[in-house]
Each structure stands twice: as structure tokens, then as C-alpha cells.
Image: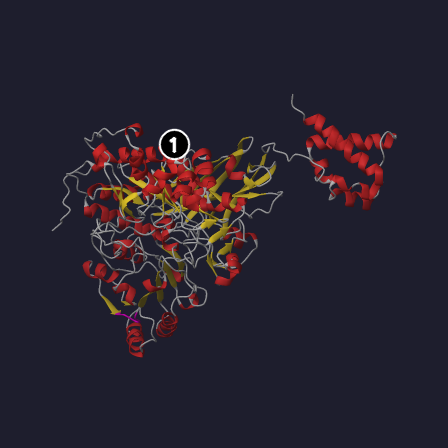
Amino acid sequence: MNDHAQTNTDPTADISPNSSPSIKDLTLEEKASLTSGGDAWHLQGVESKGIPGYMITDGPHGLRKSLATDTGDTNLDDSVPATCFPPAAGLSSSWNPALAVKVGEAMGEECVQEKVAVILGPGVNIKRNPLGGRCFEYWSEDPYLAGHEAVGIVEGVQSKGVGTSLKHFAANNQETDRLRISARISPRALREIYLPAFEHIVKTAQPWTIMCSYNQINGVHSAQNRWLLTDVLRDEWGFNGIVMSDWGADHDRVASLNAGLNLEMPPSFTDDDIVYAARDGRIAPDQLDRMAQGMIDLINKARPAMNRNDYRYDVDAHDEVAHQAAVESIVMLKNADAILPLAADAKVAVIGEFARTPRYQGGGSSHITPTKMTGFLDTLAARGIDAAFAPGFTFADEPQDPALTDEAVAAAKSNDVVLLFLGLPEAAESEGFDRETLDIPAKQTALLKAIAAANENVVVVLSNGSVVSVAPWRDHARGILESWLLGQAGGPALADVIFGRQSPSGKLAQSIPMDINDDPTMMNWPGEEGHVDYGEGVFVGYRYYDTYDKPVAYPFGYGLSYATFAIDDVVVTRSGANTARVTATVTNTSDVDGAEVVQVYVAPGKAEVARPRHELKGFEKVFLKAGESTTVTFDLDERAFAYWSETFDGWHVEAGDYTIEVGISSRDIVATGVVTLDGDGKTKPLTEWSTYGEWQDDPVGAAIVADMEARGRAGTLPQLPDTDIVRVFLKNMPINSMPMIKSDGGRELTAFLLDEYAKATRTE
């Protein structure tokens, strides 16, 4: 019997908000109280003034509402049943923002029923290193993909009158020493890699809240970082919500409030510290008012949904959303000789404990109690598909039991095809620690080799929250499905794909390297003496592998289908001084319905800084019936061509040629076009430390240098020697070093250049 029977499926219907006091109606003590939680999972209300203490609780791939919400309980396995959607490791592989919206809408409806005002997610931190223990709940190694997919979760949840908490802001890319580690990152890497996903979501969807991270950034804790929380987030990006701490990340409430932190979670019961600081001037009255008013605004936004007392979500409908999300999360990595899909009457052996005991989510604060759970063997039984089963191995970290191997090999020998479920047990990856190896347990790969020796028709189905090594064993499998962690409906989704009800359409949101030591971050992973250097700069994931032609097992954006597609008629046109438009025709050239993801990369030409070979700047997932065609269009704005210039402290587009690549992975480019852009006209101010070559390349400086050289030839200024070796020296020499070549005359020439430049650039 469905104990969540639907009585009203529109949580925003017939709602009118209650009135709420102004910040002017509150005492100093009441204002201070609003900036800290009431307990581990509730805001601190001021009931006497009509301000309720609503609940906020974990996501990010479903609602984790503790059954003991009033005791500060942190039992991660004791929560109200909720739909467990595929974690971001899987959903990101869908490359389908519209699907993310549907998942978000369902999560929002469950929050309305359970009286949760804010769900804590999505998490859009970059998968800097595949060993990161929390990679399963983050979206991608690429900030463009992470931001443009995860924004759907924010839009979906908030469309139901419930808030999200975009996290973890910022540069939370490892679990090792996460509570205090200082991430040492260049401004350029921050702006190009670690902040853009947050920036896009803030500017596009305005999440109600943002959760700052535990770690320090360049020596400053995120919760106390005014540059991060106020200068960038609010003043530059226009964020109008509230910022909360991660649980226990606020170490100095006064410093944090001054930096722009509205809410400490959980409470440290130090409201008096804020009161005293406000009285003695360490907190300006208007700053406290702003932070407290933000909390009132948040509560007011949540009031309508929280006042719905008769709303019940549709459990079965949400399970179906989870089912479709799981289908689109699956990435087919290998399908030699079209071993998949299997015929319904195929004689199949299913081997591997994951088929019976699915690993469907990650460990830690996002651990959900699902409303239902359907594994692969359950699905086969429900659909009347006969299959032999052998567990093959245990999840425990113990030597392989030879009896399990013998049983599995016997099953393989007596059937036509083997579906071998391998992967990482839950103990191998979780919030709280980073993995130590990219490999799956050795006893599983040994089992694969034994089974392949008995039956060459092996399809490996992987269960893991971040990429695992496949190169050492993939030759023993004719098919490989990367199924990540598929949530509560993973069993039906896998059966749909394996038996051909649906064509796989997932694409990798994360490169799969040949070896973990190929990853550029390993030289500095996971840090030392309380800090971690982001020495790879902007060369993260495919930006490194593709730029330096490093072999990978499977590239970013890769994924196979049962259908085949053609991308033709690619046209790249300049649409403005620094913008472009790309159009292409996509055709399903097979007799199978399916979906292709068209990916657009921008490859800069010669640049003043080291830039990746190319970067993702557009994508669209296209569903096409057999033989159907459609046209896709991408408008690339100025940002698509820009890099963050530390000289200009801003985005910079250089003039020149840019190649636009259209493909189906970062390494499968089907067509290219070139656009020539004007650039943004920014030039570096010339000084005595600018080189002679920089003066010659500058539009103002070039004219002055030409005048100087003409005067030298005319005899009115000292003349520099005009030889090949002098020209070589001059090009890379600061002009204040010209006395090396011309003694006192060099000083006269330097003074002339600087004086004329000052005249030419002087503004009245």
C-alpha cells in the first residue's frame, strides 16, 4: 500500500504567505540569533515576532531528513524515506539539463511534503582528481558542463517554492584534511576552473542559499573570506540569497558575519559574541542588519510551501523520474561485435554481488533511505527473464573464496553470455576520505580473467562513484557499461539498456585515464603541511590530457549508442566583434531510436598565456527517431573565447583566429570552423619594465618607438645600433635596461619613451 498517497500534486497551489516583521522590529539580540541555527537541522526562529525556525537538511540527490530532527542527531542511516535519484556522478553523464530540472522538481515536491525549506545541494565542485572521495556527488571535471547541468536542479527545486544550497563554495576538491587544508590556487585557475559553475548558476537561477566550504583558499577560511562571499559573490555576480557555513566550518562568527556569512550551522550557541561585537563596533549595525534581513527574506520565500499541510507527492511518479534519470546516466564504453543489446531469450549468466546487492548511492551526509529499491536481479524476476546467478565475490576486504570463483566459472561455461557486475564497494569511497587507488579490488579483476577464459562473451557492468581503471582488464570484456551509482531505480534502467528497450545515451563527464599517475594533479595530491598546491593551474582533466596528447582509456564526452548518427552541414559564423554562431544538422542514420550529444569546443590560436588546446563551450542532447534529422544552434558569447587575465584582473579576449570544433567527445571532432575576432581592445599599461618588444606591439607604444627611431636616424636623439643581435636583445629587454646598449643615451631614450607615453595616454 502506498503510504504517500497523492492528495495534491501541486505544492504551490492556493498558497498565500504570512506577513513577516521587518528587521527594524527586532532587538539586537533577535537579529544576532537569526545568524545561527536553532539546532543541527533548523533555522533559529523568533516565534514571538512571527519568524519560524524552518528545517534545512541534506541532499544533493534526494532528501535526507533525519527521523530525529530535534536532537541534533547525525545518524546518516536513519532518515525519512525519499526518492534516491542517481548521484551527480551518474546524472552528469546524461548531459541533459532538462532531465536535471525534472529531478529537481521531484526533490522539491518531497521537501514540501516533509516541511523542509532548503535542501542542501547541488554540489558543483570540480573533480580535480578522480581519487576524490566525494566525486560521486560532484558533477564534472569541466566547469561549463557542471554549471549548465546542475543549474537544472536549482531551477527544478526552487520552482516548487523550496530553496537549494549550492555548495561547497569554493575549491573543496578533496576530503583529505578537508576541515583545514589551504588550497593554494592562482587567480586564473580559480576564475577559469573552480568558480565558473557557481557563477553560472548564481547568475542564471539565483539559488536561495550558498554553502561555503570547510577549506581555506590561499590561507583564508571560506567562511571568513570577504573577497569570496561579498566582493565576488554578491557585488560582482549579483547574488541576492544567503550564505551558510558547512556544518562546523565557521570558526569565528564575528569575522564570518563581517565577511558576508548570514548563517552559522550548526549553532555554536555564541549569539552573545555577535551582540557584544555589535555593541563595541566590531560589527557595523548595517552589516548585521543585512545578514539578519537575508534570513528573514529566506524564511519569507519558504513560507508559502511550508504552509501546505495537505500536500503528498506521488511516490511512483518520482520513482519513474529516477528510472529515466538512471537510464540516461549509463555510459556504454565498449560494445565489440555488437554484443549488446541482448535478446530477451538469451541464455545469460549474471555474476557479481552488485547485481543482487546494488550499490546505488555514495556514503556520508547524502545517504538516503529510498522509498523503494529495485536491483537488477529483482528486475529480471519481475520481467520473467531467466538467468543463472552467482555472487562471484564478497564486498569484504578479504581474499577471494575459491568456491565463489568455481561457481561463477561454472555458470559462465553453461551460458551464452555473462553479465559480470564489478565495481567499488561502499567502503572504498565516501565523504570523509579520499581513495588511495584507481583500481577496483584485485579479486574482482582476477575473477573476470577466469570467467573470460571460460566464456569470451563477457559484458562488464561497473558500479562506482568516480572513474576506475579499465585499461588493465578491458581486453577481457567484449562489452563495458559504466553505470556509476544509479539510485533506487538502477535495476530497471540497466535491464532497459542491456536488453534494448532503450539505447544508451550517456557521455563521460570525467576522463578515464590509463593510470592515476597520468593525472596532472598527482604531483601535489593531496598536499602537505596543511596546504595543497594547485600546480596544474587550468590544466585539469581533458584540458591537460588533450593539450599534451596523453593517452586516455576513454576521453571526456565519450559514450556509445545502439543508434548511429551523422553530424553534417556544420557552419561557423562570426556574429559580433567577439561572438560566434554554430549550426549543424544531426541525423539518426540507423533503424534504432536514440540520442546524441553534440559538443562544441573552442580552441584558441596563439595566446599571451598558456591555454588548453580546447574547452567545452556548448552542448545539446538530441533525441531522434530512426532516420530523423534536426538542426542545432549554439551561440557563443564573448566569455566562450576569454581567459582570466591576472594583468587586467578580469576576462580578456585576444584578437585573432579561434577554431570552433564540433564533435561527439573531446577527441572525436567531426567538423571545425575558424572565426577571426577583434578582441576586447585591452592593452597592458606600458612602464619602464615593459620590454622593447611589448612597446612595439602596443598600438600607442609602437608609434612612439617609431618616432624615437626616426629621431635617432635624424640625429635629434641617440641612435640604437641596428644589428640582428641588438634587435634580439632589445625585444625581450625592459626599456630601463637600454643603458646596457647605449649607456647615457639609453637613459635618454627610456625617458623619451615614458614622457611621450604619458602625454599620449593623459586624460583631461
Is the residue 508 above or below the residue 263 in the image?
A: below
Relative to 667, is 307 on the left or the right?
A: left
Q: Residue at x 19, y 47 (%)?
A: 315
Q: Amino acid at mark 1?
A: Pro
Say which of 19 and 104 sits in front: 19
Name the residue at the top extreme.
764
- Name the residue tied to disc 1: 285
Question: Residue 498, image x and y in percent?
Answer: 31, 58
Mark count: 1
Question: Residue 375, image x and y in percent?
Answer: 24, 59
Q: Residue at x 29, y 64 (%)?
A: 354
Q: Main secondary structure of the magenta part?
A: loop
Where's the C terminus, which quadrant?
A: top right
Question: Residue 211, image x and y in percent?
Answer: 37, 44
- Please say whether residue 251 is visible from this viewpoint: yes
Q: Quadrant of residue 367?
A: bottom left
Say which of 534 and 230 sits in front: 230
Relative to 177, is 306 on the left or the right?
A: left
Is residue 684 a member of the stretch shown in magenta?
A: no
Say which of 371 and 491 sits in front: 371
What segment carries the magenta color?
A: 390-394
Say which of 714 and 86 sits in front: 714
Name the residue at the front extreme.
280
Relative to 679, is 634 on the left or the right?
A: left
Q: Quadrant of residue 357?
A: bottom left
